Amino acid sequence: MAPLRLRPATPDDLPLLTRWDDEPHVLESDPNDDWGWATELARDPDWREQLIAEVDGVPIGFIQIIDPAREDSHYWGEVAPDLRAIDIWIGEADYLGRGHGTVMMRQALARCFADPAVTAVLIDPLASNTRAHVFYERLGFRFVERRRFGLDDCFVYRLERSDWADQLNAGQDEASSVSR
């Protein structure tokens, strides 16, 4: 698989992101959100990162990482400090099912947990999106609750720092046993 890199999203990405918003597979997982791209791409608050995932220089997906206690819409309501929340999708349908989402998510999690104060990461896939549930559970997320966000019926999942660290250690142990 070609290397995947994350770069900051910019106002130049507006046509790309608005096109992705109309893709059937994106609408299926995020039908009711208006991301306000024209406004949001011009903003750079210190509580948020908006990233474009690229493979061989080709934009394939989007990630947003927020501090849910500090973000200005209060989407998550009252939450503890030192959490992060991630939104992620692959915009280009040709890149679905090729492992890029896993790489994107692992890179996003590494960014989140690079801050030693961060204790856990939250995600909120639609309750009906069983493929996303399996994806997140495979990455170590644990179901917390079913919750309504606006018009969307969602499952809230959480990945604790200790579970992330255990996964990293297991991966290193596996890699070192293979190289022996």
Image (cartoon, rainbow, N blue to C red):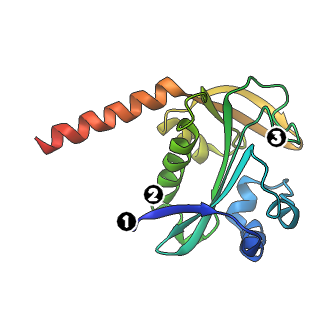
Against 55, is 43 above or below? above
Q: Which dot marks residue 101?
A: none
Could you tell me how far apart the alpha carbons at marks 1 and 2 are, in whole angstroms?
Answer: 8 Å
Q: Residue at x 70, y 34 (%)?
A: 155
Left or right of 159 on screen, residue 16 = right
Q: Name the residue under label 2.
A: 99
Please state, as top left, top right, bottom left or bottom right, where the N terminus lies in the image. Answer: bottom left
Residue type (three-letter) at the residue carrying disc 2: Gly
Indicate the secondary structure of the residue bearing disc 2.
loop
Left or right of 91 on screen, residue 135 = left
Q: How crowded is mark 3: few (under 14 residues within 10 Å), some or many (20 or more)?
A: some
Indicate the secondary structure of the residue bearing disc 1.
loop
Residue type (three-letter) at the residue carrying disc 1: Met
Please state, as top left, top right, bottom left or bottom right, where the C terminus lies in the image. Answer: top left
Q: Residue at x 62, y 28 (%)?
A: 143
Left or right of 139 on screen, residue 24 = right
Could you tell me how far apart the alpha carbons at marks 1 and 3 are, in whole angstroms?
Answer: 35 Å
Q: Name the residue under label 1.
A: 1
Could you tell me how far apart the alpha carbons at marks 2 and 3 are, in whole angstroms?
Answer: 30 Å
Image location of residue 55, percent across then percent down: 49, 70
Q: Which of marks 2 and 3 is nearer the N terminus?
A: 3
